[in-house]
Amino acid sequence: MSPYKSPLEGYENAEPLPTTVNADGKSLNNPPGPRSAAYDEFPKPIDSSNNGFDFHIYYMPHLTEEAKFAKELHERVRREFPELRIYRFWDKPVGERNHVPAN
């Protein structure tokens, strides 16, 4: 059992989030919700017109509790910040650093 409480505490009875993607073909469609003030109140020199948020959830996929927590954290961010462009949750390493060159 994880020593940390679930990021979804308080959302136990929430409707499931949609799995559809937006017109960009990549980001997840979040249900509309109140726009958080933090989205518009960026500290200088961050330019809010260029989607000033960029976050990544790093975890060890082979550690069951860590993977579960990471997935719940991803969902919590979607629920708390529906206005953000958020991509699907990856259950394996992705990105250029994880590319294995062909021999």
Image (spheres, rainbow, N blue to C red):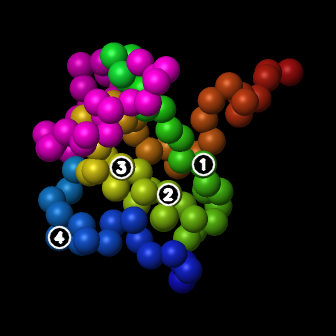
Question: Relative to 67, is 42 on the left or the right?
Answer: left
How would you rate the neighbour count of disc 3 (Cα within 10 Å): few for under 14, some for 14-19, many for 20 or more? some
Distance (Cα) linking label 1 and label 2: 8 Å
Q: Looking at the image, is 2 positioned above or below residue 59?
A: below
Question: Relative to 51, is 33 on the left or the right?
Answer: left
Q: Position of residue 100 (x, y in %)?
A: 76, 29
Magenta residues span: 18-47
- Amino acid beneath label 2: Ala
Q: Are marks 1 and 2 in contact (CB under 8 Å)?
A: yes
Of labels 3 and 1, earlier in sequence is 1
Of labels 4 and 3, earlier in sequence is 4
Query: Which residue is identified by label 2?
Result: 70
The tag on residue 13 is 4
Distance (Cα) linking label 2 and label 3: 11 Å
The tag on residue 58 is 1
User: Mark 3 falls on what kind of element?
Assistant: helix
How would you rate the neighbour count of disc 1 (Cα within 10 Å): few for under 14, some for 14-19, many for 20 or more? few
Comparing marks 4 and 3, which lies closer to the viewer? 3
Q: Are marks 3 and 1 in contact (CB under 8 Å)?
A: no
- Amino acid beneath label 4: Asn
Q: Are marks 4 and 3 in contact (CB under 8 Å)?
A: no
- Amino acid beneath label 3: Val
